[in-house]
């Protein structure tokens, strides 16, 4: 049986751990609120640019752009968003398991796909398994600006434009609530489903100079905005997952402290009872 000193030491160390996890929970809650606000405020822009692109692309059957056409798939790109740190519950493991299983199911050779990854956890996961990572970003801000990922987004879209890949999928955790994040797969390129999820009636636009020249500029921007929107969504999910994980850790620490305190009090009571018995026994022996 552990001594009183050992139990008291464990109680002290657990209380210190609880202070850390409680502080991390509050920090993550603050970051989550800001990240959720960023993700929601980006939605109107996303909806509007989708409406404009859909109106231009579907309003004229003569419009021809490679980003709007499916082609024979020789190589697939996977854009994966993870975090740089752990302590976020199943946030990273769920998405990495999904991507890993999907790639193994779809491809027989590493020459058939390439991975673009954000986050140190994802980068280490794929490189440790000798999976091809062509582009990466680590150390992304907790509240990222578009400038932080513009180069990566542009390079990723150019992979398709230059026919280095023939389709591109995004994988990220979609933020539903503080306690619910869902691993989401979205086909980013080619842009064959512009009207999906857009129930608004398309507006009429006058084009200058013409549709094709506008699409040359607008379609890459639209694809890059989809990437940025997914990153904002993923960041909100990351902070929510970390907040929940730290709350669970704090609750577990409280349970451990309660159990150890009960053991400490019982052991202390037993020690006092034994001392009283020894005193009574010694007094009786002197009579």
Image (tube, grey):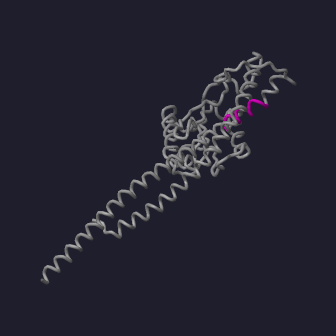
- Quadrant of the image for the C terminus? bottom left
x and y percentages locating residue 85 in the rendered image: 56, 52
Residue plotted at (35% across, 68% down): 6
x and y percentages locating residue 167 in the rendered image: 62, 30
Residue 209 horizontal side relative to residue 125, left or right:
right
- Residue extending furthest toward the bottom: 286
- Quadrant of the image for the N terminus? bottom left
Residue plotted at (18% across, 76% down): 280
Q: Main secondary structure of the magenta part?
A: helix
x and y percentages locating residue 192 in the rendered image: 66, 23
Residue 225: in magenta span: yes
Whether residue 202 is situated above or below residue 255 in the rendered picture:
above
Residue plotted at (74% across, 45% down): 147
Residue 141 horizontal side relative to residue 57, left or right:
left
- Residue extending furthest toward the right: 209
Residue 55 horizontal side relative to residue 182, left or right:
right
Quarter where residue 37 is shown: top right
Residue 121: in magenta span: no
Residue 21 horizontal side relative to residue 199, left or right:
left
Residue plotted at (66% across, 38% down): 39
Give the magenta range. Answer: 217-227
x and y percentages locating residue 82 in the rendered image: 57, 44
- Residue extending furthest toward the top: 61
């Amino acid at each position: 049986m552990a001594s009183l000193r050992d139990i008291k030491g464990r109680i002290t160390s657990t209380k210190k751990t609880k202070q850390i996890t409680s502080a991390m929970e509050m920090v993550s809650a603050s970051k989550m609120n800001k990240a959720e606000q960023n993700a929601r405020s980006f939605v109107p822009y996303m909806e509007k640019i989708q409406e404009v692109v859909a109106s231009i692309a579907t309003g004229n059957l003569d419009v021809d752009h490679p980003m709007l056409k499916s082609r024979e798939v020789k190589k697939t790109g996977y854009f994966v968003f993870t975090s740089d740190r752990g302590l976020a519950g199943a946030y990273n493991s769920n998405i990495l398991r999904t991507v890993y299983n999907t790639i193994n199911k779809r491809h027989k050779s590493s020459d058939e796909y390439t991975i673009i990854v954000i986050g140190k956890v994802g980068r280490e996961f794929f490189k440790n398994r000798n999976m091809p990572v062509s582009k990466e970003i680590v150390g992304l801000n907790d509240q990222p600006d578009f400038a932080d990922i513009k180069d990566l987004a542009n390079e990723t879209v150019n992979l398709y434009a230059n026919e280095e890949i023939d389709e591109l999928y995004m994988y990220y955790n979609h933020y539903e609530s503080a306690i619910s994040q869902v691993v989401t797969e979205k086909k980013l390129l080619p842009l064959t489903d512009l009207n999906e999820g857009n129930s608004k009636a398309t507006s009429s636009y006058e084009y200058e100079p013409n549709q094709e020249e506008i699409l040359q500029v607008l379609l890459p921007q639209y694809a890059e905005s989809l990437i940025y929107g997914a990153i904002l969504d993923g960041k909100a999910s990351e902070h929510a997952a970390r907040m929940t994980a730290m709350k669970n850790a704090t609750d577990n620490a409280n349970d451990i402290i309660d159990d150890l305190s009960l053991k400490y009090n019982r052991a202390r009571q037993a020690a006092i009872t034994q001392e009283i018995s020894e005193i009574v026994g010694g007094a009786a022996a002197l009579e």
